Amino acid sequence: MKPYEPTAKTIKYVFIFAIFIFLCCKKKTVQDNRLPNDDFSQNSIEAISLLGDTLFTPKALPSKTLDHYKKTKARYLKNPKNVENLIWYGRRAAYLDHFQKAIGIYSEGIRQFPKEPRFYRHRGHRYISTRQYGNAIEDFEKAVALVEGKPDEIEPDGIPNARNIPISSLQGNIWYHLGLAHYLKGDLEKSLLAFRNRKNTNTYDDNWVSGGHWLYMILKRMGKDKEAEEAIAMVNTDMDIIENTNYHKMCLFYKGILTEENIRPKSDGSSSDDVFLYGLGNWYLYQKKDTLSAKRLFKTLLDKGNRYSFAYLAAESDWKHHFRE
């Protein structure tokens, strides 16, 4: 019998099939860092931006962050009625940008522990992420009532800074996020009140510059120039800044110690530029009365920034209320 000799056409099909198998295997390795479908819905909607953009859950997830989530979930499943397990389960889900799941976890925590202020504080934060500012304000106001008259407590970081020193407190974060939520809704008076209340919880220099940045912008927008200068009067170049270097630089810029050249962002899509893009754009609005330059900076931020950073949310809100044609 004559030995079989494959035709050119057969060889072509075998080659195509081999490539198909290779690509399937390669795709599987990429998907190994995805959460199983029974954990998170794939391609689900996390939020609708104020400009009408649909924000979906991410498909590929960072391995280290995902590992932290899985370990936290395992602890929660062993003891689902433990307050700390519930809080960290929600926090780890939120760090994966799965905000709707985090909101659901915190809501379960509130159902079980309605007088635990941390659930309202964290759910309010994720209501901000998902542009539900009214709901966020309600949660933070409940948290304020629950902590009234109680001693403050340090809030541990989910992603520690370089020195592994937590710089924020529970009450400080409640007031900070409440002030931010009011700012994003355009209520400067209530935002100002919240940020001023937050000053009572400032312990580290980082707290002074982060709060000072927002207070300065709010007061300048309200035409209270003298109070704006007073809000950042204590900011100086010798401060011990652990992580809020961008807020520190913006405050030094407001004081005239740094120039625009010192803080001008590279506009390369780095989320660290968001603070500079928004702060500088805002400065052009109230200091220079230069709407075109402000609009250009905000547009760069909205095109390239982190869609969940506070600076991005502020630019998004301003764009909707002042710039959208």
Image (cartoon, helix red, strand yellow):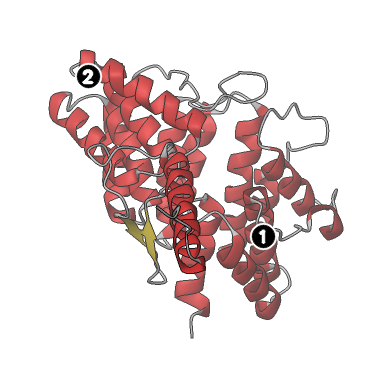
The mark tally for this picture is: 2
Is residue 57 in view from this perspective? yes
As drawn, the label of residue 75 is none
Mark 1 closeness class: few <14, some 14–19, many ≥20 residues within 10 Å: many
| Residue type indicated by callout 2 | Leu
Q: Is residue 185 left or right of residue 85?
A: right
Mark 2 closeness class: few <14, some 14–19, many ≥20 residues within 10 Å: some
In the rendered view, tell whether residue 51 sits above or below residue 154.
below
Give how far apart the Cα atoms at labels 1 and 2 are: 42 Å
Residue 246, by quadrant, is top right
As drawn, the label of residue 77 is 2
What residue appears at the point 55 percent right and 54 percent down from the top-left corner? 306
In percent of width and height, residue 58 lies at: 41, 49
What residue appears at the point 30 percent right and 50 percent down from the top-left corner? 42
* Residue behind mark 1: 277
Residue 142, by quadrant, is top left
In percent of width and height, residue 214 lies at: 58, 49
Q: Name the element at disc 1.
A: helix
- Which of 169 and 277 lies nearest the eye of the viewer? 277
